[in-house]
Amino acid sequence: MIKNIKETLKKVLEFHGVATEISECAFLNYGSIKKMRGIYVIAGPSGAIYVGKGYVKDRQKHHKNKALNNIKGGTKDTAGWKNWRENHAVDLSDCWLVYAEVNAETEISAVEGSLIHLLQPLANDECLVDHKKLPKKAA
């Protein structure tokens, strides 16, 4: 499954004209990631769990707490993560992080949106809305 996610990330980066390396590590081993901005996919045995953007290493601390339902100050528990814990939770030691350094904000947003659309990650709120599991927010 991780191979498919890496291939999808590579195609999306190429489509948007972003030249960068793709890296991976065990989800629980995110401490090895250098400080950088970029795009990332948390992947489990059956596919994408979450797609996000930002300072990759810092974001993983929050996602680990959300996945473990260990919500601490500054970490917002979202509907997508609640749904994942209730219906799809897996052993985090079986999860991977696939990521790429991207610095331009427009590139980050374009790649994130494309990946959410293509991978339909289980813990992203956007996917719950699209599947009509949550009411759409008023504009």
Image (cartoon, rainbow, N blue to C red):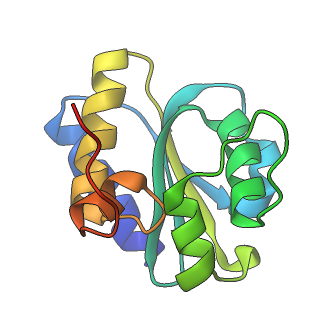
Q: Where is residue 99? Give x, y as percent.
A: 51, 46
The residue at the point 24 percent across, 69 percent down is: 131
Vertical placement of residue 37 versus 134, above or below: above
Q: Residue furthest top?
A: 104
Vertical placement of residue 136 versus 138, above or below: below
Q: Where is residue 46? Give x, y as percent.
A: 46, 84
Q: Where is residue 82? Give x, y as percent.
A: 59, 66
Q: Is residue 127 left or right of residue 26?
A: left
Q: Quadrant of the image for the C terminus?
A: top left
Q: Is residue 48 left or right of residue 42?
A: left
Q: Is residue 60 at least partly visible in the picture? A: yes
Q: Where is residue 8? Give x, y as percent.
A: 28, 59
Q: Residue furthest left?
A: 15
Q: Quadrant of the image for the N terminus?
A: bottom left
The residue at the point 72 percent across, 34 percent down is: 58
80 and 89: which one is in front?
A: 80
60 and 139: which one is in front?
A: 139
Vertical placement of residue 95 versus 105, above or below: below
The residue at the point 75 percent across, 49 percent down is: 30
Tally of marks: 0
Q: Is residue 73 left or right of residue 6?
A: right
